[in-house]
């Protein structure tokens, strides 16, 4: 009953902000990082690094991805922040203008001049905002296109981060799905909702450092 009231209240105040991590894509064949069969879990235990059972370009949105589309259309979700680069949110039909992809998208490239984004049906061969060899098709532009996946030393994209921060402060509820909340600064975004008087709900197989705030 308390959860139902929480969700109803969020909807009446413009909808929740949702934060998604690698855990929502494991059912599609893409491994996560810190789960029982995750990449970093395997490395820590001295085991073989798990490979994706499905190539990224063949992966299809999970039930969670599709549920988020339905929840947004019904007014329960205002904005979505994802650290996933697998493009499954966009493939599910979730609108790009309501989505911040903080770590990029391995199917996307962006013009370095006019900043138009192109989402392809094939993966970019590089990361770290390198030039892909293609040019922008916008009339009168012709700028070079760059991949959109962050490398380790890259900062988060400013526009995406600014949107994520704004909606985190404004939303009455932050819902975290499939994230261990250990990568900064994205892991601190849900706390912006709490500090502004909102609620926090975390759905994840493992404990997270933010559980005591939820």
Image (spheres, rainbow, N blue to C red):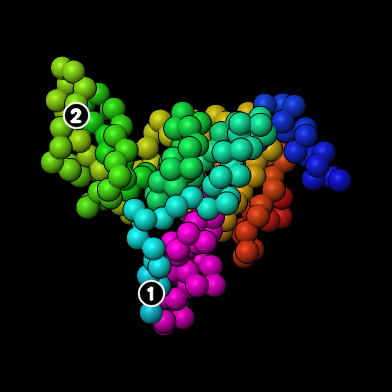
Is 74 rendered above or below residue 92? above
Q: Position of residue 9 (x, y in %)?
A: 77, 32
Q: Position of residue 69 (x, y in %)?
A: 57, 38
- Between residue 105 and residue 174, name the one nearer to us: 105
Q: Position of residue 96 (x, y in %)?
A: 44, 32
| Number of dots carrying numbers | 2
Q: Secondary structure at mark 1?
A: loop
Location of residue 206 (image quadrant) = bottom right
Q: Looking at the image, which residue is at 30% across and 32% down?
A: 117
Q: Position of residue 164 (x, y in %)?
A: 51, 35
Q: Residue 44: within the magenta?
A: yes
Q: Which residue is mark 2?
A: 136
Lateral position of residue 12 relative to residue 122, left or right: right
Identify the magenta region: 20-47
Q: Contact, CB < 8 Å: mark 1 with mark 2? A: no
Q: Residue 96: within the magenta?
A: no
Say which of marks 1 and 2 sits in front. 2
Disc 1 to disc 2, how far (Cα)? 37 Å
What is the residue that sits farthest to the bottom in this orientation?
46
Few, some or many residues within 10 Å of mark 2 (<14, 14–19, 20+): many
- Between residue 54 and residue 30, name the one nearer to us: 54
Q: Looking at the image, which residue is at 27% across and 48% down?
A: 122
Q: Earlier in the sequence, mark 1 or mark 2?
A: 1
Is 206 rendered above or below residue 114? below
Is any atom of residue 169 visible in this view? no
Mark carried by residue 49? 1
Q: Looking at the image, which residue is at 27% across and 39% down?
A: 109
Q: Secondary structure at mark 2?
A: loop
């Amino acid at each position: 009953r308390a959860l139902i009231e929480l969700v109803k209240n969020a909807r009446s105040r413009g909808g929740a902000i949702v934060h998604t991590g690698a855990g929502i894509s494991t059912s599609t064949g893409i491994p996560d990082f810190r789960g029982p069969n995750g990449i970093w879990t395997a490395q820590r235990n001295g085991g073989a690094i798990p490979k994706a059972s499905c190539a990224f370009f063949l992966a299809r949105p999970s039930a969670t991805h599709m549920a988020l589309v339905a929840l947004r259309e019904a007014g329960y979700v205002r904005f979505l922040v994802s650290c996933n680069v697998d493009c499954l949110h966009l493939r599910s039909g979730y609108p790009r203008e309501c989505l911040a992809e903080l770590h990029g998208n391995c199917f996307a490239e962006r013009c370095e001049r006019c900043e138009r984004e192109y989402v392809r049906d094939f993966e970019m061969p590089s990361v770290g905002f390198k030039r892909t060899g293609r040019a922008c098709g916008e009339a009168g532009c012709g700028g070079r296109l760059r991949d959109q996946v962050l490398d380790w030393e890259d900062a988060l994209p400013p526009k995406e981060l600014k949107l994520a921060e704004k909606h985190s402060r404004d939303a009455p509820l932050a819902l975290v799905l499939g994230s261990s909340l250990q990568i900064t600064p994205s892991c601190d975004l849900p706390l912006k909702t709490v500090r502004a008087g909102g609620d926090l709900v975390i759905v994840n197989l493992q404990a997270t450092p933010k559980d005591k705030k939820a």
